[in-house]
Image (cartoon, helix red, strand yellow):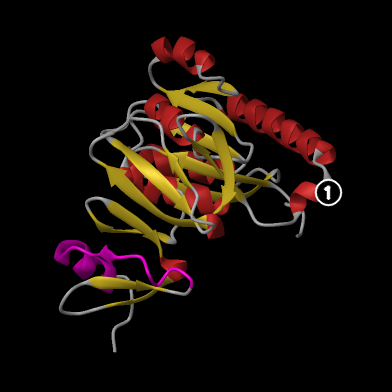
Amino acid sequence: MNEKKGLIVFIVDDNAAALESLSADLRQFEQVSEVYTYSNYSEATLPMLEVHPDVLFLDVEVPGKSGLEFLQSVRQHINFSFKVVFYSAFPDYMIDAIRQSAFDFLLKPYKQSELRTVVERLAEAHTNRQRMQPAANLSGPRKLAIQTVSELLFITTQQILLFNYNSLQRSWQLMLTDCTTYTLKRGTSASDLLELSPSLVRISNTCIINLTYLSAVENNTQRCRLAPPFEHLEIIASRRYFSKLKEQFEML
């Protein structure tokens, strides 16, 4: 794997002008290699899990979910290191940002000298982290961290077969490809699980499967046929989610 040459930065801000301004300013720094921009936290979540940015510039007040709420929700699904810079026109959020272990806080409107100081600190921290990174961690499949009721489970996406919702326990259950099962902590939502990997797809209100092991879905019954050795499992997709599933693929 090639070593990153500069910082990969994500920016989330619902103000288009502010988003474009910060993006343009960051691209002027030689320490920054890539900048991705998003207008809300929902559209930033999946790319974050795929790209592994080094830095998040988070506007605190974004409709739907605040930067502080986003950081709390996403940290339980992340197994890579990143720095957070909250930036806001409201200095009252500074204490909350510190409590969330933010790397820095940038007050809008910022001065170029203030932004430069933040970027230089970020680049220095990034360089130090790369020097300390063990070579063994640079290879092998990326692992997910999943909180169960009894432990924090570290697994790869390939080990996940499916998730089932248990209405009696009011919680999701994880089944691995070795057929072991784990009950996830209460409060874990379907959205949380789907954000773990693009391979995970919801096929009904109570089931999320790993597309890697899905061979076919019968048109009339919506019965899902899994690849061996899981073909014995009886899984039915709802018509609603079957339609959504078909939309994700090119249909012949």
Question: For the residue marked with disc 1, what is the amino acid?
Answer: Ala
Residue indicated by mark 1: 135
Is residue 167 left or right of 66 when viewed as pictured?
left
Is residue 92 left or right of 99 when viewed as pictured?
left
Of the pair 96 and 30, the residue shown nearer to us:
96
Image coordinates of residue 60 in percent, x first then y, are: 39, 26
Q: Residue at x 33, y 30 (%)?
A: 187
The N terminus, quarter of image: bottom right
Name the residue furthest front.
232
Name the residue furthest bottom.
252
Q: Residue at x 83, y 36 (%)?
A: 132
Image coordinates of residue 61 in percent, x first then y, are: 33, 27
Is residue 180 left or right of 205 when viewed as pictured?
right
Residue segment shown in magenta: 229-247
The C terminus, quarter of image: bottom left
Q: Residue 40: tell me if it is visible.
A: no
Image coordinates of residue 105 in percent, x first then y, are: 53, 21
Identify whether 42 is placed above or below 239: above
